[in-house]
């Protein structure tokens, strides 16, 4: 069922979005592969390619000529090879991913995290994420995009963001070493910080957190005779690790109650933030994520043939393409799998649901660590 | 389709995450099982104390009667299971179909569980060394000689992270309910059957449903059980045991490395004990921690290994409903291959001989499962690593070792059967702290006396004997 009957309005929107995407692809390719503005990495890579990106890449589908982006290219320096020449004079951030052992993967950023999170901000309902409200960032700190991005999101919405210290690399080491008592102590340490902030009269109404930390915070609050709702939180932006429909149902039914909105997200350092509407019982709490197209595109590919998209409703491995002027990542095979979902009026392009660790890696990946 | 929900203190909860339990031979989906999430376990532990409270409202004597009734229900009745029902015969077929254990072995395990439930009064009397059981309820009492005693429960519930591979382990948690401690069960992925059937038998027999919670799930659920139950049992490999070593909250049960040692005074008559050796290795398809994985002798090792190989080497896989089936299937993909490769590597070491090689390939691959045929390895000395290995199929090493070196070299041993009348050797065995259960005499390793503690006394794990003094003011 790869061809599905869509309403004419939706068909029109899908067609329009596709045209926008193709135009965006041409613009981004021009940017990264032109000698004046281009990215040193891609200019160098172009010499090895058996095609001319400037001529041969005219549509999103043409990106298949690149094969698949290898994230190993992001490991080690010089990091400036990823900075487009046009941005050489700009202040550059570097965000890291991985790195519990060995050299982490790095991604440069200038404004992307701000733009992505400003776009995401538009998806948040003001009723639950009031403009001007203060936030708690209960997630990873250190050299991670999330730390700055959530703070920017809060500031963009007119609030002030309180943060905790959380080093996920240490958490992964604790898990790998089987030091579960230390893991619990560290989790307590993180929750202690959150409790202190929440008890300090800072009028915090919104927060970012991960599923595991939300479980832990809700449990601690309940032990103290209160709850997420009672301490005044009305909006939770949740992400960072895998989130199942069962977990989100449990959170909504048992941890949050009716007055708190939870916005599940899917994303990582390499892409923007794929948003989802708040899951509801009518749809069995299904979480369907839509990438911020045209800046990023998520596709679901056949497990046995990464050149072929699966039909709608079928499982496959998630493939990500990032198309911004700061960062070009064509067709990166993610460490996740999911189900291909139909476009909708709000997001007239494919979505992905049921995201979980890719079955080929699941056994060796330490997930859900913070 | 049969659906088995999470049981939150007796209240069914259908998860949005579902796991399918499939027949290992046909691939048929036998049931769908709701998968819990760790947070749900943590949240439900708010009611852990209620589990003990509702049990304490029933005198232990009455609970023991209920447990006896549950024994009969478990083995004979059609009991509710999720959105359906299950007869005893269906239970046997389902357990066999998902664990790979032949049906007659599943029936045997049922009988074993029945026996333990039926004899629970005697078992508790033995495990508590004749304690007046009301002491467990009240927390204190007075001995017949007038000395006050106190046994304080260390947890209102016992958490159990159960395995899939050996339905025999369930006997270990059967005494918990009569001690008025609640149960928090995380079934093994391929063996949800016993926890649910036993829980339903208990409930039908009158045990309050609020005393038992069952959370099928993945690793996060097991971790949550261990984190939130003040006392837990976990079953796993050597790494699991090592991880929880010294943790007073967790009793880890892993490989048994059970052994038979034949003393110099008896080894010349080794053939008298051949049946005992075969039974110790082969019963329950070698899956239990009490199955023998090493036979240690100072001489005749080759002859013993040859004789064992002659007896067990020809054994082939048979269909699970065949009453003669002696081998359990490996239903987890790749597991049998990995074991086979490791053994093939080890037998290339000097002084190691595969005595069953001549009976054909060890690994038998089927469409949806694999088998490992019985394997007897001769070791010329205790030095090769394989001399101290254990696998979950009929696998045994026959190790040549001087008697005076045996105790030092055998390593940790759950069950040690020592066939000897040598008082000096017996004394050394009695003093060896790395031997858990010691049998002196011609007793198969798999023959347990249920009136004795297994891998630590569960009563001592759950209750702390402590000082308690009182006078006329005491009202509790």
Image (spheres, grey):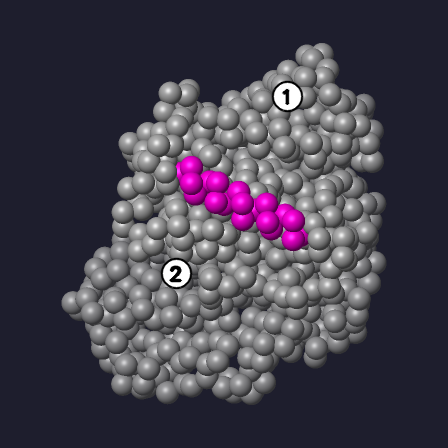
Of tags 1 and 2, the one toward the viewer is: 1
Q: Position of residue A123 (x, y in %)?
A: 70, 35
Residue A312 shown left or right of residue A332 in the figure: right
The span shown in magenta is: A14-32
**Mark 2, secondary structure of its residue:** loop
Residue at 19% across, 66% down: B349
* Gap between marks 1 and 2 measured at Cα: 63 Å
Q: Is residue A179 left or right of residue A124?
A: left
The correct choice, above or below, for B202 with respect to B380 in the image is above
Up-down: is B335 above or below A323? below
Mark 1 residue crowding within 10 angstroms, few (<14) / some (14–19) / many (20+): some
Count all numbered tags in the image, as a single digit.
2
Give the position of the C terminus of chain A as an image quadrant: top right
On the rendered structure, is B335 left or right of B454? left
Could one spot residue B465 in this view of the protein? no
Q: Specify the principal SS of the magenta part.
A: helix
List the single residue furthest toward the front.
A55
**Which chain contains the residue that carries disc 1?**
A
The image quarter containing residue A93 is: top left
Residue at the location (60% across, 41% down)? A292
- Residue at the far left: name it: B350
Residue at position x 74%, y 71% in the image: B1
Residue A30 in which image quadrant: top left
Q: Position of residue B137 (x, y in %)?
A: 75, 42
Quadrant (top left/top right/bottom left/bottom right) for the N terminus of chain A: bottom right
Disc marking residue A156: 1
Residue at horizontal 50 percent and vertical 26 percent from the top: A111
Tag 2 residue: B257
Height in image: B184 above or below B314?
A: above
Mark 2 surroundings within 10 Å by alpha-carbon count, few (fewer than 14), some (14 through 19), many (20 or more): many
Q: What x and y, as percent, mark residue B336?
A: 41, 70
């Amino acid at each position: 069922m790869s061809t599905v009957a869509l309403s004419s309005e939706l068909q029109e929107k899908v067609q329009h979005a596709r045209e926008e995407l193709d135009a965006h692809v041409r613009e981004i390719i021009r940017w990264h592969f032109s000698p004046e503005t281009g990215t040193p990495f891609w200019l160098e890579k172009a010499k090895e390619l058996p095609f001319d990106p400037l001529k041969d890449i005219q549509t999103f589908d043409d990106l298949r000529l690149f094969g698949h982006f290898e994230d190993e290219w992001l490991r080690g320096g010089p990091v400036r090879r990823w900075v487009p020449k046009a941005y050489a004079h700009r202040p550059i951030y570097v965000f890291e991913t991985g790195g519990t052992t060995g050299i982490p993967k790095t991604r440069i950023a200038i404004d992307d995290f701000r733009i992505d999170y400003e776009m995401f901000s538009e998806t948040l309902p003001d009723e639950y994420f009031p403009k001007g409200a203060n936030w708690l960032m209960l997630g990873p700190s250190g050299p991670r995009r999330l730390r700055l991005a959530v703070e920017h999101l809060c500031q963009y919405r007119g609030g002030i963001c309180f943060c905790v210290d959380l080093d996920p690399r240490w958490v992964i080491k604790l898990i790998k070493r089987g030091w579960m008592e230390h893991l619990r102590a560290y989790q307590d340490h993180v929750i202690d910080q959150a409790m202190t902030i929440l008890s300090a009269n800072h009028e915090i109404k919104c927060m970012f957190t991960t599923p595991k930390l939300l479980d832990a915070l809700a449990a601690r609050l309940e032990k103290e005779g209160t709850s997420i709702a009672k301490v005044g939180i009305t909006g939770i932006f949740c992400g960072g690790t895998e989130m199942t429909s069962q977990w989100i149902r449990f959170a909504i039914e048992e941890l949050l109650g009716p007055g708190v909105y939870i916005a599940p997200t899917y994303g990582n350092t390499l892409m923007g933030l794929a948003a989802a509407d708040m899951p509801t019982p009518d749809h069995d709490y299904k979480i369907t994520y839509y990438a911020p197209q045209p800046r990023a595109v998520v596709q679901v590919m056949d497990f046995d043939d990464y050149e072929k998209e699966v039909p709608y409703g079928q499982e496959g491995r998630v493939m990500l393409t990032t198309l911004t002027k700061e960062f070009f990542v064509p067709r990166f095979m993610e460490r996740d799998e999911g189900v291909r979902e139909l476009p909708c009026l709000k997001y007239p392009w494919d979505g992905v649901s049921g995201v979980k660790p890719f079955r080929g890696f699941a056994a060796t990946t330490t997930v859900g660590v913070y | 389709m049969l659906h088995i929900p999470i049981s939150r203190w007796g209240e069914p909860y259908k998860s949005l995450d579902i796991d399918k339990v499939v027949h290992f031979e046909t691939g048929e989906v036998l049931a769908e099982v709701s998968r819990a999430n760790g947070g749900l376990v943590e949240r439900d532990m708010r009611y852990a104390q209620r589990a003990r409270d509702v049990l304490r409202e029933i005198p232990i004597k009455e609970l023991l009667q209920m447990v006896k009734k549950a024994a009969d229900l478990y083995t004979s009745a059609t009991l509710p299971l999720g959105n359906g029902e299950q007869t005893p015969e269906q239970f046997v077929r389902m357990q066999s179909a998902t664990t790979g254990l032949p049906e007659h072995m599943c029936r045997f395990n049922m009988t074993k569980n029945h026996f333990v439930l039926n004899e629970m009064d005697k078992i508790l009397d033995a495990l508590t060394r004749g304690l007046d059981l009301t002491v467990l309820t009240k927390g204190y009492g007075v001995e017949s000689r007038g000395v006050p005693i106190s046994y304080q429960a260390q947890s209102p519930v016992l958490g159990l992270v159960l395995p899939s591979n050996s339905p025999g382990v369930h006997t270990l948690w059967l005494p918990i309910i009569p001690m008025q401690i609640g149960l928090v069960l995380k079934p093994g992925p391929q063996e949800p059957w016993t926890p649910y059937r036993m829980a339903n038998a208990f409930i039908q027999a009158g045990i309050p449903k609020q005393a038992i919670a069952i959370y099928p799930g993945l690793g996060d659920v097991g971790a949550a059980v261990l984190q939130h139950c003040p006392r837990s049992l976990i079953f796993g490999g050597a790494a699991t045991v090592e991880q929880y070593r010294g943790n007073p909250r967790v009793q880890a049960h892993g490989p048994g490395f059970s052994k038979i040692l034949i003393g110099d005074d008896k080894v010349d008559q080794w053939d008298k004990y051949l049946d005992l050796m075969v039974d110790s290795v082969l019963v329950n398809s070698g899956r239990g921690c009490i199955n023998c994985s090493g036979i240690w002798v100072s001489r005749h090792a080759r002859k013993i290994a040859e004789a064992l190989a002659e007896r067990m080497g020809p054994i082939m896989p048979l269909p699970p409903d065949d009453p003669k089936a002696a081998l359990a299937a490996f239903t987890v993909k790749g597991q049998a291959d990995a074991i086979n490769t490791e053994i093939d590597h080890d037998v290339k070491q000097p002084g190691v001989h595969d005595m069953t090689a001549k009976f054909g390939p060890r690994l038998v691959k089927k469409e949806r499962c694999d088998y490992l045929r019985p394997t007897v390895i001769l070791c010329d000395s205790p030095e090769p690593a394989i001399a101290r290995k254990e696998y979950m199929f009929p696998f045994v090493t026959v190790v040549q070792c001087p008697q005076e070196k045996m105790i030092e070299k055998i390593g940790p041993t759950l069950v040690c059967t020592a066939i000897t009348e040598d008082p000096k050797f017996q004394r050394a065995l009695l003093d060896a702290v790395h031997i858990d259960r010691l049998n002196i005499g011609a007793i198969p390793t798999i023959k347990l006396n249920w009136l004795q503690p297994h891998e630590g006394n569960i009563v001592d794990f759950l209750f702390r004997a402590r000082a308690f003094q009182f006078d006329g003011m005491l009202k509790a």
